[in-house]
């Protein structure tokens, strides 16, 4: 969290410095005359990582909690016409995606750690608590359409590289059958739980689509809302323990500064 606060303060200081330097203001004027706009954005991601549609293995979502998921982005927009109605933007974004859920499942693919530190794989029926957390470096490439002086809509693909990821949790109040539904049964009741960790099976490269809008509140200050929808499974292709694909779907809400 500290590094994000430091980054925000540094950018804010840079913004104030730009306003006071005539030479840099000339650079911004040159960019404007050549159809280039620059912006900095900060926000939070709210959403989750989920299969679509929910498979029959997941019987009920008992709870959901979004984590602290801050985003920071810088981008440049090239306007393609004199009126600045249509443009293309490219940016670089520090992305965080975080959620914690509890669910009731039946015959859910699972690999848990036993008391001796080994792993047991099979089908789990009972409660599952999952934490999914990813830090990513994201490049959005978006079409821009300016509706009027205050409103703009954007849409296009994004490409992400995962810097750090965590997909782990524990199972409780249920039983595991190993290696399949007809195998031997191990019960977990009361305070007896077993942990799991699929973090090493997360895919480094992710991509999806982004759709959103931006409102110009004041001369430089903007407010935005963007929906990002992942289109490839967060797990590697050869990971088979969870039998269905999981997709990150998040709404990013925040503010920006147009230079």
Image (cartoon, rainbow, N blue to C red):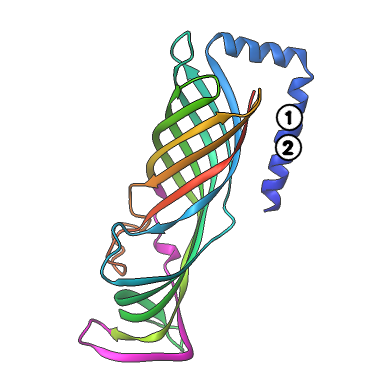
**Picture quadrant of residue 102:** bottom left
Q: Give the structural element (helix, strand or loop) at label 2.
A: helix
Q: Position of residue 179 (x, y in %)?
A: 25, 82
In the image, residue 220 above or below residue 191:
above
| In this picture, residue 127 sits left or right of residue 56 | right
Residue numbers of the magenta segment: 178-206
Q: Which mark is residue 218?
A: none
Q: Taking 180 as reference, is 82 left or right?
A: right
Q: Which residue is mark 2?
A: 10
For residue 19, say whether it is visible: yes
Q: Are marks 1 and 2 in contact (CB under 8 Å)?
A: yes
Q: Quadrant of the C terminus?
A: top right
Return the residue at label 1.
14
Q: Residue at x 37, y 91 (%)?
A: 187
Residue farthest toward the right in the current orientation of the protein: 20
Q: Residue at x 42, y 40 (%)?
A: 159
Is residue 204 or residue 146 the one in the foreground? 146
Question: Magenta segment: does it hold 195?
Answer: yes
Q: Alpha-carbon distance for marks 1 and 2?
A: 6 Å
Element under label 1?
helix
Q: Position of residue 150 (x, y in %)?
A: 55, 24
In the rendered image, the vertical position of residue 128 relative to residue 226, given as above or below? below
Q: Is residue 249 above or below residue 50?
A: above
Tell me where residue 214 appears, x and y as whole percent: 52, 31
């Amino acid at each position: 969290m500290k590094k994000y606060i430091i980054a925000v303060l540094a950018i804010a200081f840079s913004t104030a410095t730009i306003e006071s330097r005539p030479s840099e203001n000339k650079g911004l004027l040159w960019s404007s005359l050549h159809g280039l706009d620059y912006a900095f954005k900060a926000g939070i991601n709210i959403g989750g990582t989920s299969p679509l549609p929910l498979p029959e293995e997941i019987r009920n979502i008992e709870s959901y909690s979004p984590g602290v998921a801050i985003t920071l982005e810088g981008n440049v927009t090239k306007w393609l016409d004199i009126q600045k109605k249509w443009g293309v933007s490219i940016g670089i974004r520090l992305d965080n995606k975080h959620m914690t859920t509890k669910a009731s499942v039946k015959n859910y693919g699972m690999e848990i750690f036993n008391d001796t530190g080994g792993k047991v794989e099979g089908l789990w029926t009972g409660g599952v608590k999952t934490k999914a957390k990813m830090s990513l470096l994201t490049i959005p490439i978006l079409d821009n359409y300016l509706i009027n002086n205050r409103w703009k809509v954007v849409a296009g693909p994004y490409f992400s590289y995962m810097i750090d990821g965590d997909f782990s949790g524990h199972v409780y109040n249920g039983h595991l059958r190993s290696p399949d539904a007809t195998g031997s049964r191990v019960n977990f009741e009361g305070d007896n739980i077993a942990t799991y960790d699929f973090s090493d099976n997360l895919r480094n490269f992710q991509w999806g689509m982004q759709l959103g809008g931006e409102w110009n509140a004041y001369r430089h200050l903007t407010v935005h809302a963007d929906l990002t929808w992942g289109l490839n499974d967060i797990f590697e292709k050869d990971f088979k323990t969870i039998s269905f694909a999981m997709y990150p779907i998040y709404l990013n809400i925040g503010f920006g500064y147009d230079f």
